[in-house]
Image (cartoon, helix red, strand yellow):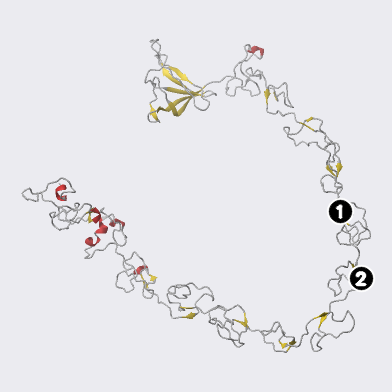
């Protein structure tokens, strides 16, 4: 990138340049000196700066627009400056625009397989002093000989790191394929052989004599019976588990005991199998002597100490042996398999219904008397009263029978639902008012919620306007005025938009039309608009003034200061609707004084606080 000036021959001369790669660069432009008056060899003061740009591949651009700025330490900001030369100045280039001018030829070797390859070259050139040594056509391979004179030293690609495993002493250019010498066991028959994964940067490639063989045995389970602890010698220690481990098998090794060789844990004798992994190999003192007896715990003569059944067991026989009239009396016979050995209380006959499906089933009865009553399902909630069977069921705890109470039912089927009082007239405003608010209607849901009993609470539908912005909001007495009454029995409860009417006008209080609504519409009492149906009704901004003659700010267009006359007229005697009285404009309380020096009370002042607002006003 260069900056140019025009010499006395009107030719462009480079006055400073730089090679820009990235980041910030600096260009120094020199000034024309006074020692060579006939030659212009630099910039004149305020001379325009002419900029050009040349890329490595020979493309030449003119910089047609450039923005320069100068840093000011006083303001700590950059200030734009003109594109002219100024001695001893420092400019910052912030933006440029370029235009293509021409393409220059860049000579050199254009074959990337040679050491002298130039990636920016676009024209071949001779690199030899005597090109005839190569061919007779300098710098060109487009001719039949096919030889490029520009490219001299062909690249030899390979690993150039002498410490690498694949070092190539003939390589002239490193291709990034070097990989290191990696030591390890490379004998595939050894235990510590490292199988290659196909990664030359990881796979061992040089044997270091560290190989050791596979040694099979019990290795992985140090709790095993035949585990061999290592001694720290890889040439001796078991390093490969061959699945031969078998555990310590604790148990009884006494052949006369009940549980000799009890490898299956059933407490019984087992013959030795000859298998190390099954037979007991370690006696743990658990041998059990043989004890004969009844081993059936459900039998009467069960012997908890017996471990060998002698097949002499007889059952528990429960019964009564004292009262022959008892239902469970069993007479003795002398046979232990038949006689009572577990006496219980005698059960005397008790009459009652013994059918568990009957309504009056008696779980205490011992003799069925055919008194059973069939169950009748239904709602049995009779509040606090007894039903025909003498029972009281109050499902909801309200002391009242359910709405669907069935006096003939004796078994509850979960179908009860309570009496729910309210309005049952579908045309009423508060139809089905089962909720907390008895003055509104609720949606029909289910029999457990909906009103089923009338309590005369119905409210008729009262049509009217319920728009709060309307003039006749809640006009239940139909006098044309809004009403604030919230009595649910008389207020409007159903909105009809067509019933609403409004007092339209400007509702923006910043405008005079809002405040002077009554005056504009010739209304005797003061009212204000409640809706702005026409947005063009706001015309004049309000001009607020103090209309209290007790304040200095009191303003009267017509009438004297002392007059209590507040009519507002323009010079044409027309009403000025822009004027709006407002107490907020009254600030300073008026203090009167005598301004006539012929009176004893004469007092002259220019202080608005001490004097009259009339005089202070001018």
Q: Which quarter of the picture shows residue 48?
A: top left
Residue drawn at x 86%, y 81% as measured from the top left: 339
| Up-down relation of residue 398 to residue 572 (above or below) | below
Query: Quick check: 170 left or right of 117?
Result: right
Q: Which mark is residue 249?
A: 1
Residue 18: percent from left, percent from top:
49, 21
In this view of the protein, which residue sits in the foreground, 86 or 420? Answer: 420
Earlier in the chain: of badge 1 and badge 2, it is 1
Count of marks placed on residues: 2
Q: Which mark is residue 436?
A: none
| Up-down relation of residue 176 to residue 280 (above or below) | above
Q: Are marks 1 and 2 in contact (CB under 8 Å)?
A: no
| Up-down relation of residue 290 to residue 405 (above or below) | above
Which residue in the protein does label 2 denote? 310
| Disc 1 secondary structure class | loop
Residue 176 makes an appearance in the image: yes
Residue 446: percent from left, percent from top:
54, 74
Residue drawn at x 72%, y 29% as measured from the top left: 180
In this view of the protein, which residue sits in the foreground, 397 or 600? Answer: 600
Residue 618: percent from left, percent from top:
15, 46
| Disc 2 secondary structure class | loop
Q: CA distance from mark 1 to mark 2?
A: 31 Å
Residue 582 makes an appearance in the image: no
User: Alpha-carbon neighbours of circle 2 within 10 Å: few (<14), some, or many (≥20)?
Assistant: few
In this view of the protein, which residue sits in the foreground, 327 or 485? Answer: 327
Q: Which quarter of the picture shows residue 95?
A: top left
Residue 371: percent from left, percent from top:
70, 89
In this view of the protein, which residue sits in the foreground, 542 or 367? Answer: 367
């Amino acid at each position: 990138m260069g900056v140019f000036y025009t010499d006395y021959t009107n030719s462009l001369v480079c006055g400073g340049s730089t090679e820009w790669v990235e980041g910030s660069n600096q260009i120094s432009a020199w000034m024309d000196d006074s020692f060579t008056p006939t030659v212009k060899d630099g910039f004149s003061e305020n001379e325009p700066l002419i900029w050009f740009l040349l890329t490595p591949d020979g493309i030449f651009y003119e910089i047609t627009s450039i923005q320069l700025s100068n840093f000011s330490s006083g303001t700590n900001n950059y200030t734009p400056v003109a594109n002219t030369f100024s001695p001893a100045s420092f400019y910052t280039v912030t933006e440029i625009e370029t235009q293509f001018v021409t393409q220059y030829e860049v000579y050199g070797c254009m074959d990337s397989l040679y050491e002298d390859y130039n990636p920016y070259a676009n024209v071949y050139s001779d690199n030899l002093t005597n090109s005839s040594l190569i061919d007779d056509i300098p710098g060109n391979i487009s001719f039949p000989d096919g030889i490029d004179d520009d490219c001299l030293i062909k690249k030899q690609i390979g690993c150039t790191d002498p410490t690498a495993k694949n070092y190539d002493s003939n390589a002239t250019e490193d291709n990034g394929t070097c990989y290191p010498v990696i030591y390890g066991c490379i004998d595939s028959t050894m235990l510590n052989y490292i199988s290659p994964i196909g990664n030359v940067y990881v796979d061992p490639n040089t044997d270091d004599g560290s190989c050791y063989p596979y040694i099979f045995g019990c290795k992985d389970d140090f709790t095993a019976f035949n585990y061999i602890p290592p001694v720290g010698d890889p040439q001796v220690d078991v390093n490969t588990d061959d699945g031969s481990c078998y555990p310590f098998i604790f148990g009884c090794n006494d052949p006369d005991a009940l549980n000799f060789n009890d490898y299956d844990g059933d407490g019984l004798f087992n013959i030795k199998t000859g298998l190390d992994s099954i037979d007991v190999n370690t006696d743990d003192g658990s041998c059990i002597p043989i004890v004969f007896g009844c081993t059936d715990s459900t039998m009467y003569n069960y012997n908890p100490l017996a471990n060998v059944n002698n097949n002499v067991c007889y059952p528990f026989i429960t019964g009564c042996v004292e009262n022959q009239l008892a239902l469970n009396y069993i007479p003795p016979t002398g046979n232990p398999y038949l006689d009572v050995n577990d006496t219980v209380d005698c059960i005397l006959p008790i009459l009652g219904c013994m059918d568990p499906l009957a309504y009056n089933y008696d779980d205490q009865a011992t003799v069925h008397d055919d008194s059973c009553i069939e169950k009748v399902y239904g709602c049995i909630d009779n509040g606090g009263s007894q039903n025909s069977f003498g029972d009281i069921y109050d499902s909801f705890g309200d002391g009242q029978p359910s709405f669907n109470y069935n006096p003939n039912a004796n078994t509850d089927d979960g179908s009860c639902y309570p009496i729910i009082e309210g309005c049952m007239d579908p045309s009423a405003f508060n139809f089905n008012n089962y909720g907390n608010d008895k003055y509104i209607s609720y949606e029909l849901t289910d029999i457990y919620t909906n009103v089923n009993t009338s309590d005369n609470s119905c409210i008729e539908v009262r049509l009217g306007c319920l728009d709060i912005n309307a003039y006749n909001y809640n006009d239940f007495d139909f006098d044309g005025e809004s009403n604030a009454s919230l009595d649910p029995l008389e207020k409007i409860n159903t909105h009809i938009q067509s019933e609403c009417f409004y007092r339209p006008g400007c509702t923006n209080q910043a405008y005079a039309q809002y405040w002077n609504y009554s005056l504009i519409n010739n209304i005797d009492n003061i009212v204000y608009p409640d809706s702005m149906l026409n947005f063009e009704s706001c015309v004049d901004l309000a001009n607020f003034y103090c209309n209290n003659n007790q304040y200095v700010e009191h303003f009267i267009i017509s009438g004297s200061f002392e007059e209590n006359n507040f009519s507002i007229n323009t010079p044409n005697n027309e009403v000025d609707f822009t004027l709006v009285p407002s107490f907020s404009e009254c600030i300073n309380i008026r203090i009167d004084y005598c301004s006539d020096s012929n009176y004893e009370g004469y007092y002259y002042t220019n202080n608005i606080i001490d004097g009259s607002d009339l005089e202070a006003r001018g």
